[in-house]
Image (tube, grey):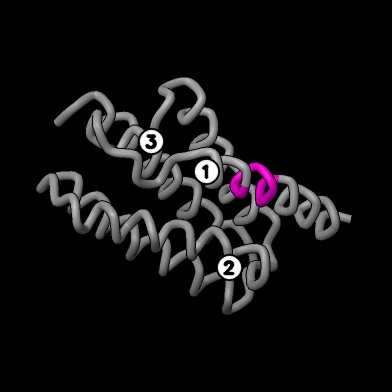
Amino acid sequence: MSIDYLKITSITLFLDILFFIILYTRKLKILDYLFIYNAYIVHILFLTSLFYDDEIMIDISHYLLFILLFISVFIIHDVYILGVCLFLITTIQILWVIEGRCILNKNDQEFGYGKTIGICSLLFTIVMSFIIGKKQN
């Protein structure tokens, strides 16, 4: 397993721990529970695809991740879950800047990374931050 896969596996497992803590310490609404359980399903699919180095499943996980992140601002009520999502999207953007690429790609691929995706992710981060602030108050 490459160092990039170890980085992303560590981040994914850290997110899973945060979701586990939220599940058992917060009073959540049904959509919050469903979101976390769906995130776990995507993470299992993702970690399995990393283990087997299955590029098709990694790409599918990419799509599912961004769908989950995008819908989170519309369906999540708990600010801690939104905070975890904000942490993830920020971490992804930091890795893009540090590495100059998506760390899941092979050296010659550009899937999941680029100027358009970077700008959209930045705007999404701003919107998510605003929604967290609004829900917090």
What's the amino acid at mark 1?
A: Leu
Q: CA distance from mark 3 to mark 2?
A: 22 Å
Q: Earlier in the sequence, mark 1 or mark 2?
A: 2
Residue 124 sits inside the magenta stretch: yes
Query: Residue most toward the left?
Result: 52
In the rendered structure, find residue 71 and report the number of the disc placed on it: 2
In the picture provided, is 20 more to the left or to the right than 87?
A: left
Please state which amino acid type lies under the numbered disc 3: Cys
State how far apart marks 1 and 2 are (Cα). Answer: 14 Å
15 horizontally vs 6: left or right: right
Which of pointers 3 and 2 lies earlier in the amino acid sequence? 2
Which residue extends farthest top? 98
Magenta region: which residues? 120-125
Q: Earlier in the sequence, mark 3 or mark 1?
A: 1
Local packing at callout 2 (Cα closer than 10 Å; few below 14, some 14-19, many 20+) is few
The residue at the point 48 percent across, 57 percent down is 66
Image quarter of the C terminus: bottom right
**Which residue carries the number 1 mark?**
88
Number of dots carrying numbers: 3
Secondary structure under the numbered disc 3 in the rendered image? loop
Local SS, label 2: helix
Residue 44 locus on image (x, y percent): 27, 58
Estimate the x, y position of residue 28 in percent, counting from the top left. 62, 69
Name the residue at 55% across, 45% down: 116
The picture places residue 32, in percent across and down from the top left corner, at 58, 70
Residue with the mark numbered 3:
102
What amino acid does circle 2 point to? Ile
Position of 114 relative to 32 (above/below): above
